[in-house]
């Protein structure tokens, strides 16, 4: 059976896909929405050694444990780094990789260096202060383009600090990831912090799609996102 594996971004957990997954399952796909080590329902595993390689292994282990193949692997925001790392490790398990308003990194790229300079500076300041030097405190949801009160009430109590090492540990790639077809979805109704990554994707001749919503498309435009993911997976 063809599968979707949906990877959340920083501060979130697998629960964030609850409004998207039912539509994908109704279309006949197996859907997995794992929570990465150290956040949300796995926050009890948080420690300073949790890094990008930890999160890549989280997803590789899931693919291997369920013996998943023909997978459309979707990464939101920070998880673009995870998608790239997984595609390099187990390319034959993936049919497609999808970057949802996400980092498009290359070998030796760390997420913090892929952010706009001003935003990266805010991250470093918050880590050095309330993050105790190893955590990224939760970002303002309004900055991310979430404005509906019901969405804010649903998201806010569920978000948890994110391990800083995941943003400073660079990708280590062999080049195998380039064999997995890729597409990019940009959320265009906010500050568009990931526009440079959409442009990088376009420069590589990846299909690039737009959704007229904020960064949290799986919350603020779930039906539109699910329909687009089905179209991408079926193309």
Image (tube, grey):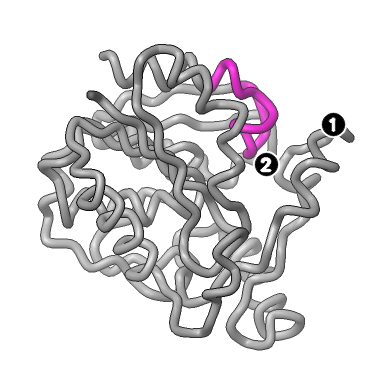
Q: Is residue 172 left or right of residue 39?
A: left
Frontmost residue, 95 versus 78: 95
Q: Can you give x and y, in whole percent of width and height, for residue 170 in the image?
A: 34, 71
Q: Is residue 185 left or right of residue 69?
A: right
Magenta stretch holds residue 221? yes
Q: Can you give x and y, in whole percent of width and height, for residue 14 in the image?
A: 53, 46
Distance, label 2 to label 1, CA atoms, is: 17 Å
Going 57% across and 31% down the picture, which residue do you hit? Answer: 187
Frontmost residue, 57 versus 190: 57
Frontmost residue, 71 versus 229: 71
Query: Looking at the image, is 196 positioned above or below residue 53?
Result: above
Going 50% across and 20% down the picture, which residue do you hit? Answer: 226
Going 31% across and 21% down the picture, which residue do you hit? Answer: 233
Magenta stretch holds residue 134? no
Please give the residue where the numbered disc 1 appears in the rendered image: 148
Q: Can you give x and y, in whole percent of width and height, for residue 150 in the image?
A: 85, 33
Residue range corresponding to the magenta coloring: 212-225
User: Mark 2 or mark 1: which comes first in sequence?
Assistant: 1
Q: Can you give x and y, in whole percent of width and height, for residue 113 in the image?
A: 46, 67
Query: Which residue is situated farthest in the right direction here?
Result: 149
Please give the residue where the numbered disc 2 appears in the rendered image: 191
Quadrant placement of the C terminus: top left
Query: Looking at the image, is 188 positioned above or below residue 129?
Result: above
């Amino acid at each position: 059976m063809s599968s979707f594996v949906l990877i959340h971004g920083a501060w979130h957990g697998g629960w964030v896909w609850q409004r998207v997954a039912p539509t994908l399952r109704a279309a006949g796909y197996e859907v997995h929405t794992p929570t990465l080590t150290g956040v949300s329902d796995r926050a009890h595993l948080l420690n300073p050694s949790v890094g990008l390689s930890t999160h890549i292994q989280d997803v590789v282990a899931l693919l291997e444990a369920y013996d998943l193949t023909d997978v459309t692997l979707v990464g939101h925001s920070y998880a673009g780094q995870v998608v790239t790392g997984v595609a390099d490790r187990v390319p034959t398990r993936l049919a497609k990789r999808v970057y949802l308003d996400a980092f498009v990194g290359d070998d030796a790229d760390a997420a913090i260096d892929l952010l706009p300079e001003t935003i990266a500076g805010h991250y470093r300041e918050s880590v050095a202060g309330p993050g105790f030097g190893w955590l990224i405190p939760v970002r303002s949801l309004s900055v991310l383009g979430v404005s509906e009160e019901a969405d804010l009430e649903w998201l806010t109590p569920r978000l948890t600090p994110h391990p800083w090492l995941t943003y400073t540990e660079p990708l280590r790639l062999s080049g195998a990831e380039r064999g997995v077809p890729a597409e990019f979805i940009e959320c265009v109704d906010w500050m568009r912090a990931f526009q440079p990554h959409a442009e990088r994707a376009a420069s590589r001749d990846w299909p690039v799609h737009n959704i007229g919503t904020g960064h949290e498309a799986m919350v603020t435009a779930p039906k539109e996102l699910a329909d687009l993911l089905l179209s991408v997976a079926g193309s």
